Image (spheres, rainbow, N blue to C red):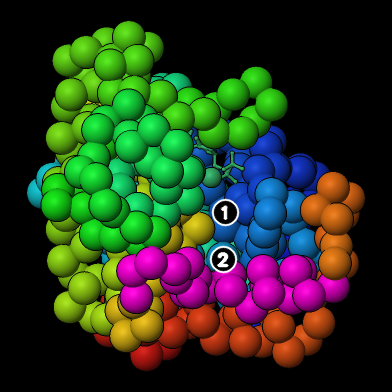
Amino acid sequence: MSKNVVCETKLPDRNPDIRGKVRDIYDLGDKLLLVATDRISAFDWVNPVGIPEKGRILTQISLFWFEQMADLCDNHLISADIADFPPEFQAQADMFAGRSMLVHKCDMLPVEFVVRGYLAGSGLKEYKADGTVCGIRLPEGLVEASKLEEPIYTPATKATDGHDLNISPEEAGEIIGAELNQLAADTSIAIYKRGREIAGERGIILCDTKFEFGMLDGRLTLADEILTPDSSRFWPADQYEPGRAQPSYDKQFVRDYLESVNWDKDSPPPPLPDDVVMKTRDKYMDAYRQLTGKEEL
Ligand SMILES: Nc1ncnc2c1ncn2[C@@H]1O[C@H](COP(=O)(O)OP(=O)(O)O)[C@@H](O)[C@H]1O
Ligand SMILES: [Mg+2]
């Protein structure tokens, strides 16, 4: 497969209906084509330089996990085979193959279903301040990156400024209904646990992760991407050491570089140099190989 970088996709007569930070989305009526580009974001800013094959790698990781979790929950996937896409996408296989998923359009639930098995990020911040995470009281004496006895469901919503806002499980129940919230929480924890076990056997710690669910024909349906480095914190197990920040599996070189150049994080970021791009690409590929056991995309 060619190693071209695809930062933006388009059809001859059509742009994507939505450009997220990382994905281009084409609205096909009752279906969507979700295209993972090679864009990379760090500190909430998309870098002007892409990471070759990142989009393909993330899509293939999601596909691997959808298969692993198929018995736990319905999911939105119809096909990732370009032969099943509308002809105008097939005509641009270089752009779309391997990085795109044809999915059922779901009525998305306005909650981010976060599961945490270790203490990090906003969970760590809240724990240090209050001894809780999303209002859930945790034992005393935990440190950064401590493993939690039992994984916890720590939902979030999108605040008006686009940032995530942690809420309690009860508040999530008020937003989407207690029964549905319980089902989604139980499903999220079951998927996280299986994911953690599989990743753990392969030398990767799955710290925490975010799922998105929607409704399809009245059924709870797992949507978006799952258990990718973009929706989860992955830590290399051989470097795990509670009490300090863990190296991020994929974006560490990017973050280190951006910290080293004293960028203010308040204006467009400086382009990543080639060596950072290539090392980052290798990390994504390592994650893919380690998780799926496959050598090539
Ligand atoms: N099956 C689906 N039906 C409807 N919307 C979906 C589905 N799967 C994912 N989405 C939405 O598509 C978008 C994915 O684009 P992304 O680039 O990840 O955006 P963001 O920058 O908001 O994370 C998200 O808003 C997600 O909720
Ligand atoms: Mg997203």
The residue segment tinted magenta is: 241-261
Quarter location, residue 61: bottom left
Task: Look at 44% across and 22% down and name the residue there.
Answer: 110
- Which kind of residue does numbered mark 2 sit on? Gly
Residue placed under numbered mark 1 in the picture: 35
Q: Residue at x 16, y 66 (%)?
A: 197
Identify the residue at image location x=74%, y=76%.
Answer: 257
Residue 238 place in picture, x, y as percent: 32, 85
Viewport quadrant of the C terminus: bottom left
Within 8 Å of ligand 1, the CB of disc 2? no
Compared to residue 45, the image places residue 126 above or below, namely above
Q: Secondary structure at mark 2?
A: helix
Q: Position of residue 195 (x, y in %)?
A: 22, 60
| Residue 279, visible in the rendered structure | yes
Q: Label 2 to label 1, Cα distance in Å?
A: 8 Å
Q: Earlier in the sequence, mark 2 or mark 1?
A: 1
